[in-house]
Image (cartoon, grey):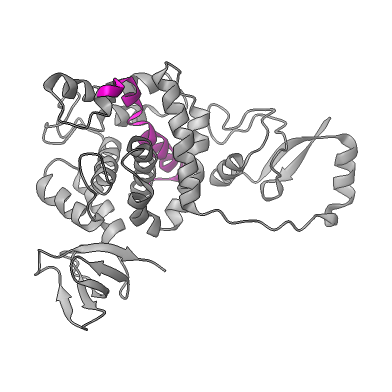
Amino acid sequence: MGATYVNTNELLIGQVIAEDIFANTQFPIILKNTMITQEHLHILTAFQITNIPVLVDNNVKKSIETNENSKLDIPTVKISFETKFQQAVNNFKKLFVGWEAGSKIDITKVREIILPLVEEFLEDRSILFNLNHFSNAKEYLYNHCISTGLIAALITHKLGYNQGYVFQMAIAGSLADSGMAKVPYRIREKRGSLNETEFSEIRKHPLYSFQMVKSLPAIKEEMKLAIYQHHERLDGSGYVDGVKLGKISLFSQTIAIADTFHAMTSDRVYCPKESPFKVIEMIKEYEFGKFDIKVVHALTDLVASLPIGTQVEVSNLGFGEIIFINHLSPTRPLIKLQNTGEIIDLSKQRNLYISQVMFN
């Protein structure tokens, strides 16, 4: 067997990596002798790696070199983001079950689950409005972990951080609730109200998460801190330590906002989902002083900065289109109703809100 370099775009599922693959990382993102899967192709694309050494039989290598123009034109089938997302959730659940049994976090497997979703999520903002449709109350925890990682990555990108930090935040966000695997199932999945002892145990999950990731060299130290602090609040009302402004990192706040936003926009056993627009307003009004304003503004821009003409559904009134954005109240634009032609100013009619965005 020999080795040859192949362009990433020409890699085939089933080919075998000839050398460890690094991407400005201390440890390999893909190990030598790994058989390529669809997930590996996404990871290589995400890290912008263009040429890969693969094992090849010498006779096959010669044939490839002399017959490059004889490639088969194999049609590709586009897989929907929702399908990829659900597969990621299923794979994450398998890891989570292992953590419950005492397994350590395999960061390579976590990368393979979350990173292929990140690039597509960053490119298509409509997915942000559909995450709550992908989730269900029964499998909420695993959906929530993947979604928190994606939203944290999106906010980090909006804040202007480079790709490395965006990927790190995707991983950190998805692992923020990994410590829930150490919380007894009967407490974690209890449908009724938690007693004081049970609630105290739930509040330990950021500590458990930190203990699970603290020895992983592939995760930056500031990301480990963000995992530990993702339930802290700037006014000192959070947990585990109840620290305040000045001691809570921006990355911690990013995961906190991502975690809160997805939770409030999703159906849970004990609470129905809310509109993303309503959730933004609730965070600003009821959680004022708890979250970093830069992070709140970044998420607000991602949700509310819709182009004129965007089709939306207004609570109780049906469909319409945005005709003007009030930058002082971006979640409450002027909307022209489809059926009546009436123009509604949501900034003056506080009982109404955008319940859904309609993307083509």
| Snapshot quadrant of residue 4 | top right
- Residue 132 vertical position relative to residue 149 in the rendered view, above or below: below
Q: Which residues are magenta?
A: 161-186
Pinpoint residue 157: horizontal percent, then vertical percent.
38, 49
Is the C terminus in the top left, top right, bottom left or bottom right quadrant?
A: bottom left
Principal secondary structure, stretch drawn in magenta: helix
Is the N terminus in the top left, top right, bottom left or bottom right quadrant?
A: top right
Q: Is residue 315 magenta?
A: no
**Residue beneath the point at 65% across and 46% down:** 50
Q: Is residue 179 left or right of residue 346?
A: right
- Residue ranking furthest to the bottom: 341
Pinpoint residue 354: horizontal percent, then vertical percent.
22, 64
State how many labels appear.
0
Q: Is residue 214 left or right of residue 113?
A: left
Specify whether residue 173 is in view: yes
Pinpoint residue 266: horizontal percent, then vertical percent.
28, 47
Pinpoint residue 267: horizontal percent, then vertical percent.
27, 46
Q: Is residue 121 left or right of residue 316?
A: right
Specify whether residue 125 is in view: no
- Residue 255 vertical position relative to residue 295 in the rendered view, above or below: above
**Residue beneath the point at 56% across and 36% down:** 23
**Residue beneath the point at 73% across and 56% down:** 74
- Residue 92 vertical position relative to residue 67 in the rendered view, above or below: above
| Snapshot quadrant of residue 306 | bottom left
- Name the residue nearer the viewer: 288 or 359: 359
Q: Is residue 180 magenta?
A: yes
